Image (cartoon, coloured by chain):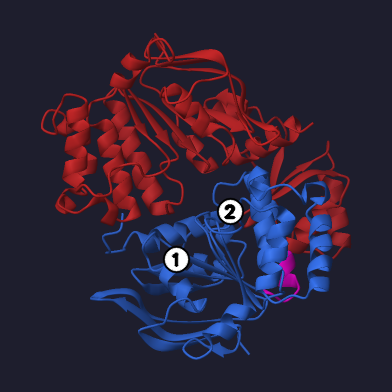
Amino acid sequence: MKAVTVKGISKSYKQEKSSVQALADISFEVDRGELFGLIGPDGAGKTSLFRILTTLILADKGTASVDGHDVVEGYREIRKHIGYMPGRFSLYQDLTVEENLSFFATLFNTSIQENYALVKDIYIQIEKFKTRKAGALSGGMKQKLALSCALIHKPSVLFLDEPTTGVDTVSRKEFWDLLRNLQKQNITILVSTPYMDEASLCDRVALIQEGRILDIDSPEGVTGKFGKPLWAVRAADMYALMRQLRKMSEVESCFPFGQEHHVVFKGDDKAKVEVVLRANGFSDVAFRRIAATIEDSFMDLMTKEQP
Amino acid sequence: MKAISVQSLTKRFGSFTAVDNITFDVDQGEIFGFLGANGAGKTTAMRMLCGLSFPTSGQASVAGYDLYTGSEDIKKSIGYMSQRFSLYEDLTIKENIRFYGGIYGLTNAQIKDETQALATSLQLEDKMNSLVKSLPLGWKQKLSFSVAMLHSPRIVFLDEPTGGVDPITRRDFWSMIYAAADKGTTVFVTTHYMDEAEYCNRVSIMVDGRIDALGSPTELKDQFQSKDMEGVFLRLARKAQRAEM
């Protein structure tokens, strides 16, 4: 049995006169014990999908099941067996750290003691603040408390909606280490993120944009399909280099990537491009053949999708 | 004259030193990346530079005005945009421009011209009477940057302007930053994307309220023997002592 099955799910929201399509005919499956990433920008439909799977809203069309239970018929069963950490901090601000955790444990007929082993690695980092009100915690500590509360009843499937948004690089790395450890305890994890670089930390990912899935595969599978030679290009004046490259007909695409530009040439036109660059005063251009990253693939798929 | 000049700036809240004796300058027309882990003191420092809170000690001038005596002049000379606060969702695009134009003292004729120019440059001609909340996030962010630039400020402060936007829009946004700097506007920007740190002329990294590194991306990578800015950031931020996170 799959941990999560999604078949042809669509959802739209009505605005004054128009309606916004949040999800358009989405289908995928998540295996038991898998760490599955939904990768996409804000507004892609990630939260709507999570809210459908956690039985908080109904889809317009399609079916979905979690742990073998249908999200409509079996919503009571699902709610007993999942953990959900919404994108917005949703614990009780006027209860202490320990009261929050104890409250969520009680809701699920368990206690902190019973499942302490599961949350220990995370909770130990905030335990010294256990008498502090949750509202007075820093962002990082709130996040750890929310994860502890989502875990305290030993869920079989854990839904984490953008747990690392607005979090710095160091803390993001720590958070992903925590997820890897949880996965070893046989918990299926669905996590959403707008950070493309986090895709490589998942077993499989769905790239999602404007309610549509661009691709579903392992991270290596996604980047392996890029299918075009990709070059990293550097010069002293990177902005001038980008402007030059973007106006050349031999260049299919040119995107800045930190200290380099990632460039795809049409056919075998790289040699020709080098000549033109030199003629335009770029004497110091360095080319390096590279493999595509998830972000390269995402942008490539995004441009293909556009009508 | 420097766009921003900061000397031994400190801000304490009770016994907690949020910003601890920081000193740096930013040139006119420079893109200055202001990095640091959550809780390092970036927001507190930025609020002081925008004239929204007074320092405990130290000196600073922004756009030529002193932080203690010229905070109202500072507010007129800067633009500000953040991921959280930008435009009024329940006003149309046109109404937002009209509103912010009025706040910054533009004349009716100027507002009319700016509205037209903005509609053309952002290709929003047919959306000017739509509510801001109906726009996709990427467009909202580009629009709020343009609105922050309406009164041609000498300095624009951008607080995580690209958080959560798609990768193509993120890059479009940086093209707008480059174009603004090219015209002489100083850009003071925070981000959690380390690739974006590479696009800055110079970068400072805050750790526990101090500025522990300051230089061009190339200088910092040499100094900390890292192949990219992520490496530099990790080396510095990992030694943070503060309890945040």
Front position in the image: A161 or B26: A161
Q: Name the residue under label 1.
A: B224
Q: Where is residue A303 in the image (x, y as percent from the top left)?
A: 74, 36
The number of discs equals 2
Q: Which label lies toward us, 2 or 1?
A: 2
* Mark 2: secondary structure: loop
Give the quadrant of residue B78.
Answer: bottom right
Does A249 sit above or below residue B75?
A: above
Q: For the residue marked with disc 1, what is the amino acid?
A: Phe
Q: What stretch is highlighted in magenta?
A: B179-185
* Mark 1: secondary structure: loop
Instruction: Point out the tag, 2 or 1, that comes first from the N-terminus.
Output: 2
Give the quadrant of residue B29.
Answer: bottom right
Does A300 sit above or below residue B168?
A: above
Does B29 sit above or below residue A17?
A: below
Q: Can residue A101 be seen in this view?
A: yes
Confirm whether the magenta stretch covers residue B92: no
Q: Name the residue under label 2.
A: B162
Confirm whether the magenta stretch covers residue B184: yes
